Amino acid sequence: MAQNEKITILDIARRTGLSKGTVDRVLHHRGEVSRRSYDKVMAAIEELGYEPNVYASLLAKGQHHLVAVLIPSHEPGTFWELAAAGIDKAAESVGTVGIRMQHFEYDQYDIESFRAACARVLDAEPSGVVIAPLFQDETDVFAAQLRERGIPFAYIDSKPESDGYLAYFGMPLYKSGYLCADQLTGGFAVPSVLIVRIRRDRQQQSDPTINRRAGFMDYMLEHSPECTLGNVFIDPNDPDSIEGALDAWFREHPGTRHIVMFNSRIHLLVPWLQHHPDSQRRVVGFDNLKANMDALRDGTVSCLIAQHPDEQMRLAIETLSEYILRRKLPQKKDNFMHMDILTRYNVEYY
Amino acid sequence: MAQNEKITILDIARRTGLSKGTVDRVLHHRGEVSRRSYDKVMAAIEELGYEPNVYASLLAKGQHHLVAVLIPSHEPGTFWELAAAGIDKAAESVGTVGIRMQHFEYDQYDIESFRAACARVLDAEPSGVVIAPLFQDETDVFAAQLRERGIPFAYIDSKPESDGYLAYFGMPLYKSGYLCADQLTGGFAVPSVLIVRIRRDRQQQSDPTINRRAGFMDYMLEHSPECTLGNVFIDPNDPDSIEGALDAWFREHPGTRHIVMFNSRIHLLVPWLQHHPDSQRRVVGFDNLKANMDALRDGTVSCLIAQHPDEQMRLAIETLSEYILRRKLPQKKDNFMHMDILTRYNVEYY
DNA sequence: TTTATTTCCGTGCACGGTAACGGAAATAAT
DNA sequence: ATTATTTCCGTTACCGTGCACGGAAATAAA
């Protein structure tokens, strides 16, 4: 970086025989410039390797850019609370000079609230948007609106199949199921495993657990083909029923030991697990919710697969910032993030 | 953050009836200011909650701050190569606006080269320094010189016992040994484990493996008290001798299966491991060197404990930046970082 | 009291861009 | 050819700090 002499807007003004004002106009594509001048300026920019000075720019316009973050409302103790924490983290980071963040929340079970949140985002006229797309079709509609307005956006957690986004940050879901199976079995064949699932009202949403389950089952097929997989459905809003459901299941299947859940709610099983201790049992779940980590610490849960949602958020925001401030595209569009394995011995410093 | 009206240096000049020049003088503690004026300005700053505008400051002085990074030379395939990668990562990060980085390297086996590197750092007159302190006593000398000049510095990887540093980023070594043991044994009692060590010429350097070994042994004492621990010493510069050493050891101790190393060189064992396959054997090592991750992928090594040296570097640099640019102290001085568990199933996205 | 020093502090330009304003040039309308 | 419109572009006043310069006030020396 021996680029000692910084090229300024004035340098290219002199070079082209035009004025700062004109150069500024072509830099910001705001017309009012003859074809001839435009070309001359572009050529000079290319030739001299001009790069705008971010500080000067920010100072001059005084106004910070807005990055809107569109995520499900972060009830305490939920996955989205972690993601929301990443916003603050990114905000603190020096990385975000000149960027202001604002979050817009929606009820993840109410598509109307998602639509409303989208509308509020557009009203705020953001320079960039981070989206956690739970509703596939509606997200596509929103994405189209953003593209129309030239607003860049990034997805976190999951992404729709349509294109046009700046970047995506998420966990490799299928692989995470695979990893989960390996952690549950330790690589040995096991006779049977219980999968605890949550009964969903509607199926229209994107459901990350489907891919996880697929990865899990493929691993088992390879490493433990004789293993039988049981399924129990529980209702998260009715904690009392959970114990009953598990009791009933284990009454009929006394040979089963290990338990797995593919969503972030493994902590719901803690009361039952504590009432039925078994030092040989492996219990594996997902996501570093506080309740989950507590269960890890006291030994109720053996292992968690975590995806650092705060880190995903931070990266998404930084990527957008880079693009907004200097039009820099990310190196990779789809970023599959590392899966952290958490046990009671390394959860302390997470 | 409804702090709509930004307080400027001019505001507090007006407030105190002084001029911005004087305010600037007290802000930068460069004397030439009467006691009376000094107090007035400080009071106004406090009262109005003035915070300097980083862009304007940077723009005005045009000169970027220098952060010097003092680490062992990063031969390809070594631990320090990973740390060096973190420098570039931090440089790319938006976080480092106004900060320029330069690294100064030394030979980790030559104390004179460390002294020379320290001198070069001082000559460069940096605004902050990141230090990987391999030589304890010499580092203390250097730290004293930095403090004398008022230059803030942060440690990564390990830290001397003396105080005065801005922050430290490293792995909890003792705990990492504990975690390592848990990954090696899976929580079950094992009859014996082989510890492969590197014969060192001098003992004066700080040696992270000591603490790791201590944690490892305490775990074994608790969970597998009858386990015998063997030690084999190898010479990393003589690859051929390694196989011989291992062959000799296993000839005498045929009952041993599992192998562990507490430094980053587990990859040295790959040839021997490949010649003596054993699907039941667990091999655990440290650090995400490329060679180690390759061994993980092909199944030669079971598990790695990694500490993200690049992330440590990034954080150290960002912390220094924050302090240099805005005099912000880090939330925590000693930052023990998360220990990542890497297996063949999650190494892909690391 | 006058002159020399020191201490203290106000003024003004620079940093690199932004954007409003209005004038000149080019084109269209009369 | 004259006037009205556009189109294009130069000028200029900021944005908030840093810092050099020099002047005023206070103090010391004559």
Image (cartoon, coloured by chain):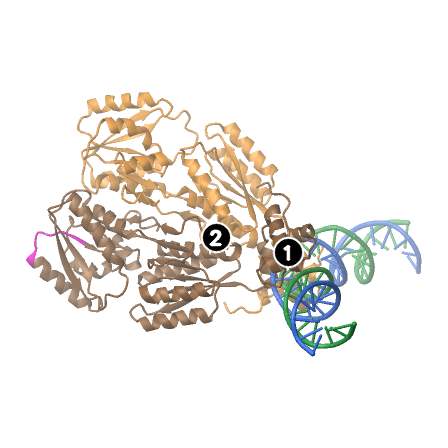
Chain colours: A brown, B orange, C blue, D green
In this view, the mark in front (1 or 2): 1
Assess whether residue A256 is covered by the magenta stretch.
yes
Q: Amino acid at mark 1?
A: Arg
Q: Quadrant of residue A107?
A: bottom left
Residue A221 location, x and y as percent?
16, 46
The reply to whether dot 1 and dot 2 touch (C-beta < 8 Å) is: no
Q: Give the residue drawn at x 49%, y 55%.
A: A323
Overall secondary structure of the magenta stretch? Answer: loop
* x 57%, y 65%: residue: B49
Cα separation, mark 1 vs mark 2, equals 53 Å
**Which residue has dot 2 on it?**
B330
Please say whether residue A198 is one of the residues in the magenta stretch. Answer: no
**Disc 1: which residue:** A36
Whether residue B84 appears in this view of the structure is yes
Please provide the residue range marked out in magenta: A252-259
Locate the C terminus of chain B and report the quarter of the image it occupies. Answer: top left
